[in-house]
Amino acid sequence: MERREICKEVSFCYHNSEKFKRALISFAMFLPLTRESASRFSVIPGILGHSCKKYPDFLKLNKRLEELYGASISSDVFKLGDYQTLLLSATTLDEKFSMEDSPLISNISDLLVEIIFNPDFENGIFKEEAVSREKHQVVEDIKSEFDCKRKYSLLQCEKLVYAGQPSEIGRLGEIEEVEALNAKKLTDSYHEVLKTARIEITMVSSSPFEKIYKKFKEEILKLERSEVDEFKNYVKSGSPKELNEQLEVMELEQCKLVLGFVTGVAEPSEGTIVLQLVTEIFGGIPQSRLFINVREKMNLCYYCSAKYDMSKGTIFVESGVENKNVDKAKSEILRQLEFIKAGEVTEDEIESAKKFLCQIYRTTDDVLSHIADFSLFYAPFKKFITPWEIIEKIKKINKEQIVEAASKVCLDSVYMLCGREQNES
């Protein structure tokens, strides 16, 4: 891996890999989450990803992608800590696998540069057709998060835990705000993003990167960049004065119970690695406490698992449960955590969790996009580490460290979504 700073808060990171037949270049823009900006920023990547000045409609763009050995352009919007991340990525065949002497990497980077820096404007603003199409898509994406009740329940519990923090804001903003956007507002937002975002450009390929680096550097230095604020990330810790609880009733058959825990330990702290192990032992793997006891032995849940968000220092336990078993399930989930805090953890449990977690990090290098995702996750925290370095740290963790880390885990919020008939009974 080689990393270079283009200018303040704009970096280029190159990962040399001989494993893949394809190459990837991504352009990530990190922006503070705010209610005022989340909706308008969320629409921008989709608009950019469908056309540019040189290829002003999707058919022309798609034809160009086909010429580049079936290259692809994709866009995404996600949250990372208290930041909204806008992502544009391009993939194509790596040059050493081309049957012709074709500069594929250079060509796809040219196209990505065109898409990002030379949009398909009409009279200086985005075209109404493109704006309308992407607004509709974002609205549908927001609705889909509501339609999936498991996803919806997790998001509602996140809002409880992150109340008053930027992270309580949805990654795509609000439907009403998206629908109210116009071409002029989105064009102004596009210029604002390029001016104020911290930017991470990532390239994964076996081909040389110098030309690609210089190409992006040239475009970045043309921008009138403003001062970019330091990355700020609110991390909650300790037991709340009063437990945050919410019950919501809908027409559904299976209750969704989500418990939100805070730890006070988030990136770039070294303690996140130990808390990953705690989470796997608690409810992350098939040998975990929640799976074996709450789901299998006691048959209290249809599913029951824990996941640790290292960017925010939070652990969420998700479970699908019958209404009559909600209290029992909640009590047993908390009881299993207390066992870990009390040191009632076997060496077999620790070893299983270590093996599972190490395997996750080993396979990072097996998927092209995972390499870029791994790099992007740590970029805002300015923590530059490899999967292999994390694996070595995992191997050295002992039981005492696990128990100590578990002691920091505190229940903060409880969200339950249940059916109307179940609630009335």
Image: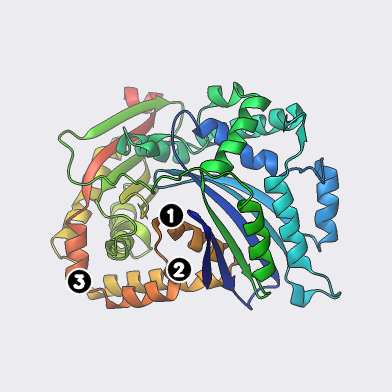
- At label 3, which amino acid type do we have? Lys
Q: Earlier in the sequence, mark 2 or mark 3?
A: 2
Q: Quadrant of the C terminus?
A: top left
**Residue at numbered disc 1:** 380
Which of discs 2 and 1 lies nearer the camera? The answer is: 1
Q: Is residue 24 positioned above or below 33 on the image?
A: below
Look at the numbered discs 2 and 3 and tell me whether their residues touch, using CB distance below 8 Å.
no
Spatial CA span between label 2 and label 1: 22 Å
Kind of element beneath mark 3: helix
Let me know if residue 359 appears in the view: no
| Amino acid carrying mark 1 in the image | Pro
156 vs 93, nearest the viewer: 93
Q: Element at badge 1?
A: helix
Place of residue 329 in the rendered image (x, y in percent of width and height, measured from the top left): 27, 45
The quarter of the picture where residue 339 lies is bottom left
Amino acid type of the residue that numbered disc 2 sits on in the rendered structure: Ile
Q: Which mark is residue 399?
A: 3
